[in-house]
Image (cartoon, rainbow, N blue to C red):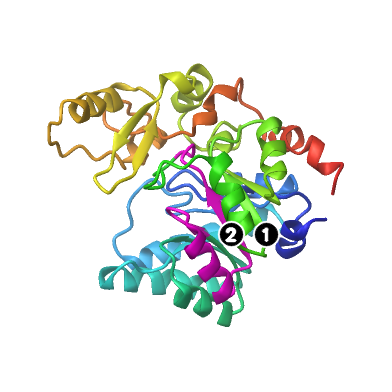
Amino acid sequence: MNRVTEILGIDLPIIQAPMTWVTSAELVAAVSNAGGMGVLGPNAGQYTVARDPIETAERLRSEIRKTRELTDKPFGVNYFGPYDSSQVELSNAILNVMVEENIKVVFLVGFSNPEEIKKLKDLGFTVVFRESTPTVKGARDAEKAGADIIIATGFDEGGSTPDKPVGTMTIVPLIVDAVSIPVLATGGIADKRGVNAAFALGAEGVYLGTLFNASKESRVHEKVKQALVQYGAEDLVLLKTGYGSYWRAIPNAFALEVAKLDAEGIQHDKNVSNLKKAMLDGDFDEGTITVSSGIEFIKDIKSCQAIIEELMSDVRNRL
């Protein structure tokens, strides 16, 4: 065991990222059953947008219960603290369901918010904190507030990138040196060499999204799985979000159109964060397929069990 496996109660220090729209009870249970920790993300298992915060929370409750039917292993739930007053009702509804369903591990994502961490700790949760743009100050503040594990995110990641283009090889040791609690590395890790490198940098576990989208248990559209195998790092495009970050994307028709508009400095209303359209529905004309720079190392579609066995083959011998 290492500190991550001990804190989370799992066999192997590999965590499946709680990706918006694309997680499900089946994926989460498959990762947990293979010895890692699966995490339910926003809109897990859903294909439509809920009408209100209460329905959103109740859908999460249903997916939590489905997950428990598929595994008796630990799993986590993603939680966004309220960014402003408009998010309070939704955050409270999600939090109430997590308490009522006796969730043990919460993955808190967003800006550094020590008060939110303290609140979660007071409720008895194990807190894994991931600052959207990781900073030494944010990591130290989170540790002081009671966070159990920190996630250090490199610019190589899929999803909305950090605002600052600091790579995984740099940010991981910076955060490791800043705190005494264990750190998970994320961003571009897609084979066991990346896992081994993360541990060499001082991380005690890895946190992966793109690679688990390329699993048999993932519910992303089959066209997306084919694209994950087909494209490499040099094919990808960066799409501006307007907030300092980017979406790293496969060059489908939508992404190429947006990239052209960005390059020409043309203002547009294209929704680059519309992951559902492409990733679930397979609509490459209207949605983004976001991936990490590690896509180059995805050669085929495997089960979560096979993915984890391959990535953890060296680490397992050292635990």
Say which of 91 and 130 sits in front: 130
Residue 244 position, x and y percent, is 30, 46
State the residue at coordinates (49%, 30%): 293
Q: Given the image, on which type of amino acid does mark 2 rest? A: Ile
* Position of residue 99 in the picture relative to residue 248 (left or right): right
Residue 250 can be seen, yes or no: yes
Say which of 76 and 265 sits in front: 265
Q: Which region of the structure is painted magenta?
A: 130-158
**Do residues under tags 1 and 2 come within 8 Å of each other at their CB atoms?**
yes
Which residue is under mark 1? Answer: 182
| Image quarter of the N terminus | bottom right
Q: Residue furthest left?
A: 267
Which residue is under mark 2? Answer: 150
Say which of 251 and 43 sits in front: 251
How many other residues sit within 10 Å of disc 1, few (<14), some (14-19) or many (≥20)?
A: many
Q: Given the image, on which type of amino acid does mark 1 rest? A: Pro
Residue 17 can be seen, yes or no: no
Q: For residue 111, which numbered disc appears in the image?
A: none
Q: Is residue 212 above or below residue 17?
A: above
Task: Check if residue 141 falls in the magenta segment.
Answer: yes
Q: Is residue 88 above or below residue 206?
A: below
Residue 50 position, x and y percent, is 33, 57
Would you identify the image quadrant in which residue 128 lies? bottom right
State the residue at coordinates (31%, 68%): 87
